[in-house]
Image: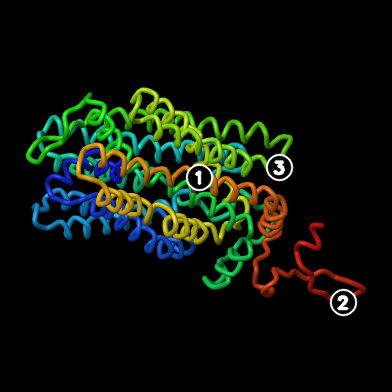
Amino acid sequence: MDRFTVAGVLPDIEQFFDIGDSSSGLIQTVFISSYMVLAPVFGYLGDRYNRKYLMCGGIAFWSLVTLGSSFIPRERFWLLLLTRGLVGVGEASYSTIAPTLIADLFVADQRSRMLSVFYFAIPVGSGLGYIAGSKVKDMAGDWHWALRVTPGLGVVAVLLLFLVVREPPRGAVERHSDSPPLTPTSWWADLRALARNPSFILSSLGFTAVAFVTGSLALWAPAFLLRSRVVLGETPPCLPGDSCSSSDSLIFGLITCLTGVLGVGLGVEISRRLRRTNPRADPLVCAAGLLGSAPFLFLALACARGSIVATYIFIFVGETLLSMNWAIVADILLYVVIPTRRSTAEAFQIVLSHLLGDAGSPYLIGLISDRLRRAWPPSFLSEFRALQFSLMLCAFVGALGGAAFLGTAMVIEGDRRRAQLHVQAGLLHEAGPDDRIVVPQRGRSTRVPVSSVLI
C-alpha cells in the first residue's frame, strides 16, 4: 500500500516537481534498487537472528521515512528520491523474513493456503495504495497527505508483530521428532547450494518477469489510462496548476484489489488440485498464468485508443492471470530450499527479480516513452502513443517468464526430493561442493551424490 500511494498521485507529483516520464520512473526505480540491495543483508540476518525483532525494526524505520517524505519542498526532488530509497529498508526486512516464519508454522497444503493469505497483501495492498492515494488527495486537496496514511498503519503493524507473533524454531514442523536440529552453514556455502539448485534459479527468473510486468503497470497504468481518456475526449488534459483527475487511479486500484484476491486464490486452488496427479503442477500453473496474461495485456494497450471499457476488461483478465504466480512461487522456493537457507534464498530471489525486473522497468518504460515523444510533434496524442508503445514491452517479457517456468517444471521433482532428504535426515551441505553424504559400501565409507541415492 505504501509503495503505490505514490503511483496513485503520480500526475500530481510530476506537476509539483516539474519532471518528465523518465524522472517519474526513477522514483520507483530508486526504491526498488534500495530494497534489492538490502534484501541479502536481511536474508543473512533472518537465517541467524530473531526474525520478529528484525521485522519490527525495519517497519518502524520505514514508517518514519515515509512520513518525512511528505514534507519535501518542490525544489528538492532529489530528497524525495532519497527518502523513497530508504523506504526499501522496511520492505527488505519483512519480504525476506515473513515467508520463512509462515513456512516454520505450517506444512503441505496448509502452508500453501497460508502463503496465499500472506500474498494477498501484494495486489490488495497495491490496489488500496491507489485508492487511498487518490481519495485522500481529493479530500485534502493536496497530494502530500496521501503519503501520511501508511505510517500510522505501520505503527499498528509493529505493535501487532511485537505482541502477537511468536518466533518458531527453524524447520521444526518438517523434521521427524528424532531428527537432529538444523544449524546454519556459512553464507558462501548457502550461495553455492542455491546456485546449484536449478528449480530455484529458473523459478526466480520466471518471477523476475512477473516483477518486470507488475512494476511497469503499477507505476504507469493510471497515467496511461488518463492519457487515453484525454485522447478520447472523455477527460480534460492535466495542465500546470490544475489538480489531475484521479478517477483512473481509483478504478485501477479497485481492479488490482479484485484481480489480486481472485488470481492468488485461483492459482493456489488450481495448483493444489493438480498437485494430486501431477507433481509439476506448481510451475506449470505459473507458466500458464504468465503466458496467458501476455496477449491480454497487449490487447489492453492496443484497444486503449478505441475503447476505454475494453481496455479495463483486458487489464482485468491479464492482471488476474498474472496474480496466479505470487503465492505459488513462494511455495516452490520453500520446498526446494532447506529451512536454514530460506531467508537467504528469499533475499536473492528478491535481488534477481528486482535487478532484472521492476528496479529498472518503470524507468525503462519512461525513458522509451520520452525518446519516442521527442521524435514526434508535441501533442496529447503523441504523449499517449509514446507510453502505449513503450508498455508493449511488458507482453514480450511475460512470454519469456512463462518459458522459464516451463523449464522449472522439468527439474522440480528432483530438487524437491533432495531438499526433503536433507530436512528429514538433519543433513547439511558441509560434506563438499557436490552435496555428498556418507553411505556404507563393503564395510567402508564412500561419498556419493545425494541424487544417486534418490535415483
What residue is disc 2 on? 444
Residue 58: tell me if it is visible.
no
Residue 3 in view in this figure: yes
Q: Quadrant of the N terminus?
A: top left
- In the drawing, does residue 282 fall left or right of residue 8? right
Number of disc labels: 3
Q: Residues within 10 Å of mark 1 (few under 14, many from 20)?
A: many
Residue furthest to the bottom in view is 444
Pointers 3 and 1 in contact (C-beta within 8 Å): no
Pointer 3: residues within 10 angstroms few (<14), some, or many (20+)? Answer: some
For the residues marked 3 and 1, what is the alpha-carbon distance in whole angstroms?
Answer: 24 Å
Label 3 SS: loop
Q: Secondary structure at mark 2?
A: strand
Q: Which residue is mark 3?
A: 279
Q: Residue drawn at (9%, 52%), measured in percent from left and top?
A: 74
Mark 1: secondary structure: helix
Of callouts 3 and 1, which one flags the residue occurring earlier in the amino acid sequence?
3
Residue at the far right in the pictured view: 442
Q: Earlier in the sequence, mark 3 or mark 2?
A: 3
User: What amino acid does circle 2 point to?
Assistant: Arg
Residue depicted at 63% across the width and 34% down the height: 272
Q: Disc 3, disc 2: CB below 8 Å? A: no
Give the labeled residue for mark 1: 398
Q: Residue drawn at (18%, 43%), measured in percent from left and top? A: 148
Q: Pointer 2: residues within 10 angstroms few (<14), some, or many (20+)?
A: few
- Mark 3 vs mark 1, foreground winner is 1
Q: Amino acid at mark 1?
A: Gly
